[in-house]
Image (cartoon, rainbow, N blue to C red):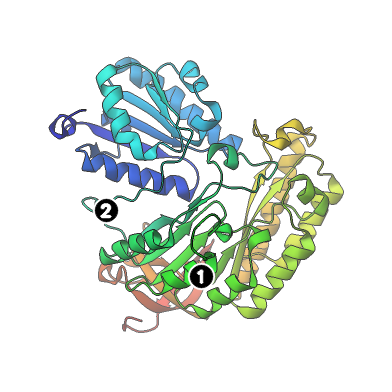
Amino acid sequence: MMKKEERRNLKVYQKVFGCQMNEYDSDEVKKSLCEKGYEITEEASESDIILFNTCSVRQHAEERVFGNLRKLSKLKKKRPEVIIGIMGCMVNAYKEELLKDFPHVDFISGTYDFGQVPEILDEVLKEREQKAFISLHYKGFRFSRYTGRFNKIKAFVPVMRGCDNFCSFCIVPYVRGREISRNPDEIIDEISFLAEHGVKEIMLLGQNVNSYGKGLHVNIDFPDLLSRVNDVNGIEVIRFMTSHPKDTSEKLFSVMKDNEKVEKHLHLPLQSGSDKILRAMNRNYSINDYSKKIDSLRKLIPSVSITTDIIVGFCGEGDSEYNQTKDVIKGIRFDDAFIFKYSPRKGTKAFTLKDDVSQRVKNERNNDLLKLQKSISYEKNKELIGREEKVLVEAVSRKNNTQMKGRTSSDKEVVFEGTKDMIGKIFLVKLTDIVHETFIGKLCNNENK
């Protein structure tokens, strides 16, 4: 085991690919490395250690990692002493194959090994040979109480990991494992700790937060947990993702309505507007089921914003199925939609199906839906002009240092004239205009709300 003083001059650069859970895991790795004496740098060229936290959900995410790794081969030739490590989902998907394909990589570590990265680095630095660390069992949730470097007003908090849904297109259950819910007292303890250190906004994370509570020895579900988090002093805003339509409930909608701190926004992945395609995807709900839940939510919270995910070009998607998706988007009118082209993932059930939609057609459908959703988003946002919204001020705007930026309770980004001392406080802001997808606001008064 290396001594702390031996690590003190070692600089670590970390690049994150993928979802919010990856962001959280990477932040915890950073903090654990700082505790052990390593120094974090934002420049790969000046680092002694380079870590990639990877994503396997889509082919594009993997290609970005591969491209970055190829570039590092030149750096490794110039500076052979640099340690290069790959972490996360791609490790669980490709395993030792990564070490064979990229001989300049020093080690790989899987999704169950984030908590052991400092010890892994000690071993790799000492032995200087390629190593693989891929644990088969999850070692439990880890939260670092280190506060030396990271002063933030927003924080991610995982409430569960893994997924039991096995959607036919999705690699997550295979690289992140089965669902494990976190003890609610530990969650509240972490959030209370964060609140004591200035955090105002919490994002509760899980591959399917609405299935939270399974396997625990206490009787609690996700709406119950939301209510408990709402009672934590110091926390002002509570957001969460991701929700699965089959597990989203009236109880959740009521908690969103009745608890002021809980955002009035729901990200609810639809994936397809065709029941035929939904069955092939193993989504376990119909378009009628989904639409009824949207109607119920909007009845309870008329101002709620709803976003979604759509996959175009899934196996068997003909013109009829695609047009059904288009009709559902027109009917529901989402505030925004993240639209992706289907890419086969080795190891999933859909990988055995015929990928029978051409890349040209996927591109056409993707662009068509992006254009449709952009027009819907613009129309819905224009309807909000003139509304007064409570906004948690997050930071100074990157484009104008006389403006502050933040988000409304319905997850709309706003910039308005202000000063740095507003950061971390909530103000009432009138939405006066919109540029692209960002609202321009005007402070209603100078009294903190």
**Other residues around mark 2 within 10 Å, as few (<14) / some (14–19) / many (≥20):** few
> Residue at point 45% right, 33% down?
110
The quarter of the image holding the C terminus is bottom left
> Residue at point 51% right, 53% down?
206
The correct choice, above or below, for 47 with respect to 26 in the image is: above
- The residue sitting at the left extreme is 5
Question: Would residue 309 be found to the left or right of residue 27 on screen?
Answer: right
Q: Position of residue 385 (x, y in %)?
A: 54, 77
Residue 183 seen from this side: yes
**SS at circle 1:** helix
**Other residues around mark 1 within 10 Å, as few (<14) / some (14–19) / many (≥20):** some
Q: Position of residue 84 (x, y in %)?
A: 36, 26
Q: Amino acid at mark 1?
A: Asp
Compare residues 231 and 403 and report the one nearer the observer: 231
> Residue at point 79% right, 64% down?
288
Residue labelled with disc 1: 224
Residue labelled with disc 2: 145
Q: Amino acid at mark 2?
A: Arg
Compare residues 38 and 122 and report the one nearer the observer: 122
Compare residues 291 and 425 and report the one nearer the observer: 291
Q: Position of residue 88 (x, y in %)?
A: 46, 36
**SS at circle 2:** loop
